[in-house]
Structure formats: C-alpha cells, structure tokens
Image (cartoon, rainbow, N blue to C red):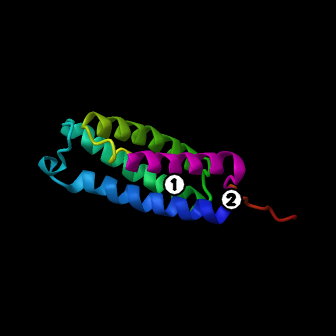
Amino acid sequence: MTYALWVVQALLAALFVFAGGMKLVLPLDQMQGPVPLPGAFMRFLGAAELLGGLGLVLPGLVRVQPMLTPLAAAGLVVIMIGAVVITLLGGDVLLAAIPLVVGLLLVFVAWGRWRVVPHRARTFARRAA
C-alpha cells in the first residue's frame, strides 16, 4: 500500500505542479475555458495547485510536518470538485470525468496517508550521557 500511495502521490504532484505553474505563467487570455473565470482567481488557483502538488510529496520526503500531505490532498479535492462543476457548466459531460478521477485519486491519497499508512515524523534520538 505504501508503494501505491507514493506512486499516486508522485504522479498527482507532477500533474498539479505542472498545471499550477502553467496557470501562474501563461497569459490570462490563453487560459479561457468554457466558463470565464476572473484572472486573479485563475492565478490563485495556480498558486494553490502548485503548493498543493508540493504538499503531496515534500512532507513525506523530508519527514517534517507529515500531516500536511493528507491536508494538501483534501484541499486539492475541493479544487477538483470545483473543476468538475465548472466543466459540467461548460457542457462537457465527458471531460468532467478527468477531474472526477483525479479527485478520487486525491481522496485515496488523503485517506491512505491519514488512516492507513501515515507518514512518520522525523525523530531525533538523544544520546544517553
């Protein structure tokens, strides 16, 4: 289960770091979707996706604040719920399956890192004097 979680986390992290980075660097006129969103909101989503993608893997790798991983996954689930709704409002029912599946994978990561195989925090053992 640990390996499956790490693989899913790494793939989702790559997806969100890429998507968030693109929302931060692309011109706003190139990011127009079926439902127009304000430019500042798109930049906010980009920053949230970028930070959430990093939050999926970095706490587990450096073993500092490991409970941030399920919180990052849960936050990204909220973004994916919004993505499903916006895609459905735009009339693309089949395309709504993509953020839905990504959201379900994020639920798997959040549940897996919260309850099944949580990351362990770094421990510093003190030497006996």
Residue located beneath label 1 in the image:
56
Task: State left or right for residue 116 relative to residue 70.
Answer: right
Q: In terms of secondary structure, where does tag 2 sit?
A: loop
Task: State left or right for residue 3 relative to residue 103.
Answer: right
Counting from the top left corner in percent of width and height, residue 116 is at 71, 50
Magenta residue check for 24: no
Report the Cα–Cα distance between label 1 and label 2. 17 Å
- Of residues 128 and 43, the one nearer the viewer is 43
Residue at screen point 52% across, 51% down:
105
Residue furthest out toward the right: 129
Residue at screen point 43% across, 45% down:
100
Q: Which residues are magenta?
A: 97-119
Quadrant position of the C terminus in the picture: bottom right
Q: How many marks?
A: 2
Magenta residue check for 116: yes
- Of residues 6 and 54, the one nearer the viewer is 6
- Of residues 60 and 117, the one nearer the viewer is 117
**Circle 1/circle 2 CB separation < 8 Å:** no
Position of 89 relative to 29 (above/below): above
Quadrant position of the N terminus in the picture: bottom right
Task: State left or right for residue 71 relative to residue 122.
Answer: left
Counting from the top left corner in percent of width and height, residue 28 is at 15, 47
Q: In terms of secondary structure, where does tag 1 sit?
A: helix
